[in-house]
Image: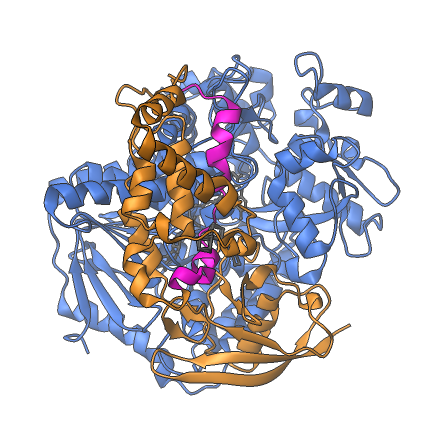
Amino acid sequence: MTNSIERYKYDILVIGAGGAGLRAAVEAREAGLKVAIICKSLFGKAHTVMAEGGVAASMGNVNDSDNWMVHFRDTMRGGKFLNHYRMAELHAKEAPERVWELEVWGALFDRTEEGKISQRNFGGHEYPRLAHVGDRTGLELIRTMQQRIVALQQKDARDHGDAESFIKVFAELTITDILKDNGKVSGAYGYWRESGAEVLFEAPAVVLATGGVGKTFKITSNSWEGTGDGHALALKAGGNLVDMEFLQFHPTGMVWPPSVRGLLVTESVRGDGGVLTNTDGIRFMFNYIPEVFKAIYADNEAEADRWYNDQANNRRPPELLPRDEVARAINSEVKAGRGTEHGGVYLDVSKRLPADVIKKKLPSMWHQFYELAGVDITKEAMEVGPTCHYVMGGVEVDPDSAAAVNVPGLFAAGEVAGGMHGSNRLGGNSLSDLLVFGRRAGIGAAEYVKSNGANPVNEATIKSAAEKIEKPFTQTGGENPYALHQELQEVTHNLVGIIRTRAEIESAIVKIADIRKRSANVTVSGDRQFNPGFHLIFDLDNMLLVAESTAKSALLREESRGGHTRDDFPGMNAQWRQVNHISSFDGSQVNVKSQKLPMIRKDLFDLFDIHELEKYMTPEEISKGGSN
Amino acid sequence: MARKLNLRIWRGNSVDGGLQNITVDANEGEVVLDVIHRVQAEQMNDLAVRWNCKAGKCGSCSMEINGKPRLACMTQVASFEEDETITLTPLRAFPVIKDLVTDVSFNYKKAMEIPAYEAPANLKPGEARMQQVDVERSQEFRKCIECFLCQDTCHVIRDHEENKKSFAGPRFFIRIAELDMHPLDTLRNRKQKAQEEHGLGMCNITKCCTEVCPEHIRITDNAIIPMKERVVDVKYDPARWLGSKIRKRDGIL
Ligand SMILES: Cc1cc2nc3c(=O)[nH]c(=O)nc-3n(C[C@H](O)[C@H](O)[C@H](O)COP(=O)(O)OP(=O)(O)OC[C@H]3O[C@@H](n4cnc5c(N)ncnc54)[C@H](O)[C@@H]3O)c2cc1C
Ligand code: SF4
Ligand code: SF4
Ligand code: FES
């Protein structure tokens, strides 16, 4: 078998062709290295394409009071101060440059009157901060990056006679293993989805940019690609995941009809004036403003409504609270019997904006509801409810270089990396994260390769990777991978979903282990050629590791914070703020241990009002006043 | 609520294949992709189909439904008659890989042939100034989700393999138009190249591409026809062409 496989040699492998992967690849190419971009679907289709609302960067085009320090503060607040301060700092500082750079590469953002890039309001951001193109910002980002790659390839064709001499895209190829030799990364192994044929990549550095884990859950806004592959690949390669208990349930997913349940309703609907009401017609968000946010959110409708026209003299409407707050509020309303028959609440923009403005500002939302639910959002309310949207947890990395802790040669950027968003991500902060840390991972990997050189793959390493791919065809237990996936989604949804308790999480851990055991008996029908059943077996294995890591981390954290809500520990606890949960894999199970969160640097500590910090930190931390 | 739905699905590969009849449950509000997934989970585990977003945003699930190029995730089951059999076949203009999946690499090759955007040499990050009205024309074309339905339907290549070499197709005509109308692009002669190198002249404005575009991009009216007209213009009056190129950039930087 091993002598018939396809083999390639590169300096750097980028696994993932979303925003993070493409940005990393551009940077690595510009550092003069040979790069392979590998992705599970066609080029230009990665999940990033679905991002709607915008990319956050404190350019200050709409309100010039904005700057990186305000953005940093908002990001830390949104994450409930569990963020790695250094990542939040780099992100806030570098995001504007990264957005402007897209414009130099041909992106066409919506404009302000003065002709600058327009910026819109979003939950948790103090000023209008999201650069956007209608509600299809992700498409613009991915197309711009895709076209940038093509431009670099065209240049390589002119300069080196072959468009693929420095960057080659391997589309519809799944990576199943990160290879290691001599304790360092030596390459990756996978198969073509089209033919099932195996492929070996030799490379001393690998950048993981594989996106999220949404498909582990039953109701999700994520595409099929969101199966946590990079999370699992990192674990299996000896890396760590940090804070996997934190998942973002976006407050507004579609709830009806069932076939579109979970599909995202962009936050821009609320940013542009949409209000949430229950079946009693009450605008309930006023009842859910937490203590820590009382100073900046309006507690009455009149003030909230004035805010849309006069932001300097009014507090913001509570519909724009961070996502975790809004999601929990909707959940409580529905539980209290004030939800719609399909288990959602109403989101209405039709009474706030004229029809033509809605169609102009929210074209794909109009389209989505009209075509898929038969609802005209310029005339009627939408029905919405929480949907699993984003994973804050991810590969533990060095903030500056994006190097994965514990695995020399492995890097991670984008949704697959952890730390940046703490316990809850603000809308728009992902697209900027992809650009900032995608670029940094490209630089980090390039520097690593330049100082470490090649690391040849051992034949034995290849053999064991190949055996894993062959295995499903030799099994005969008769389990159906689709059925197991559905079972897993039920378990995560019901037992480690938006609200959690000890008993439920414990039962989830047992059930996940059982599904994992049975997954060793899945049988594939058909052959290797473009066989979705076969593909799902690998995805399932990854999702099982992710779910185990999430459940075990959630069990340990006895408090509620951001994307982790414990019914049995409803409050936020300053002691727990100092704790990160680190998952590792010992070959048979995931183990989770506590690790101390690095103390925020003094100059960053000083950016906050001390009374605000007192709400999050212990008196000892406050008296230390940050580290030097 | 659930109803029985009769499907006829093309199954096979590049060597051979044919239509297979199958009956499957369909629930209220479902789209064709939902029923395909049910077939896949319950009856044909290895049925090949491409999809990603299931929201009409990625352009992966392109196929022919009752002979019409469509996105399976945006086609409601309810839009067919109760007793109608729905026939699902792969895109005809591209070679089949397996079942409903085709080899669309033609499109990526064409993308590589279109000269990239060229920013003004002195453009510094953050300095560009453009008016909304000026970016809107190109923005319409940048809505393209690369589903390639327009490519599939265009008669110039649909049953004419021999034309593929010299014809970029509607998706790439709007790409050229997008760059041509881009307020900052500095590369000249895009329209002439469209005519001379990318086969714009072979298009006889049947508008079939516009009809199938799920993003409702007015491919013919807003991209193809204006480019054809300008090409004619330019051929007779080079001075006017120069004027238009220069005007395009007035007051932008
Ligand atoms: C509906 C929706 C709307 C959103 N809107 C916004 C928004 O407005 N603003 C914002 O900031 N964020 C938004 N987000 C979040 C944001 O879009 C994502 O977090 C982000 O796009 C993730 O990008 P990425 O580059 O990390 O990975 P992705 O774009 O998810 O790409 C992952 C890539 O990895 C590849 N891959 C995965 N596993 C493998 C494997 N085993 N082998 C090979 N390749 C593999 C995939 O094929 C894909 O190419 C939204 C998310 C959703 C779901
Ligand atoms: S209008 Fe032109 S490009 Fe469009 S389908 Fe007809 S011939 Fe093809
Ligand atoms: S122009 Fe329309 S039909 Fe053609 S590829 Fe783009 S979105 Fe699809
Ligand atoms: S699956 Fe994305 S367009 Fe249909």
Q: Is residue B220 left or right of residue A471?
A: right
Q: Is residue A84 above or below residue A58?
A: below
Q: Is residue A301 above or below residue A610?
A: below
Q: Relative to the observer, which residue lies in front, A69 or A30?
A: A30
Outermost residue toward the bottom in this view: A476
Whether residue B246 is visible, yes or no, is: yes
Percent x, y of residue A284: 80, 36
Q: Is residue A35 magenta?
A: no
Residue ID at (51%, 39%):
B140
Percent x, y of residue A153: 22, 45
Q: Relative to the observer, which residue lies in front, B122 or A193?
A: B122
Residue ID at (57%, 66%):
B33
State the hue of chain A. Answer: blue
Residue ID at (64%, 79%):
B85
Q: Is residue B188 above or below residue A478?
A: above
Quadrant of the frame with the C terminus of chain A: top left
Q: Is residue A319 left or right of residue B166?
A: right
Quadrant of the frame with the N terminus of chain A: bottom left
Percent x, y of residue A102: 37, 32
Q: How many marks?
A: 0
Residue ID at (71%, 20%):
A307
**Residues rendered magenta in the picture:** B128-157
Judging from the image, what is the letter of the chain drawn in orange? B
Q: Is residue B156 magenta?
A: yes
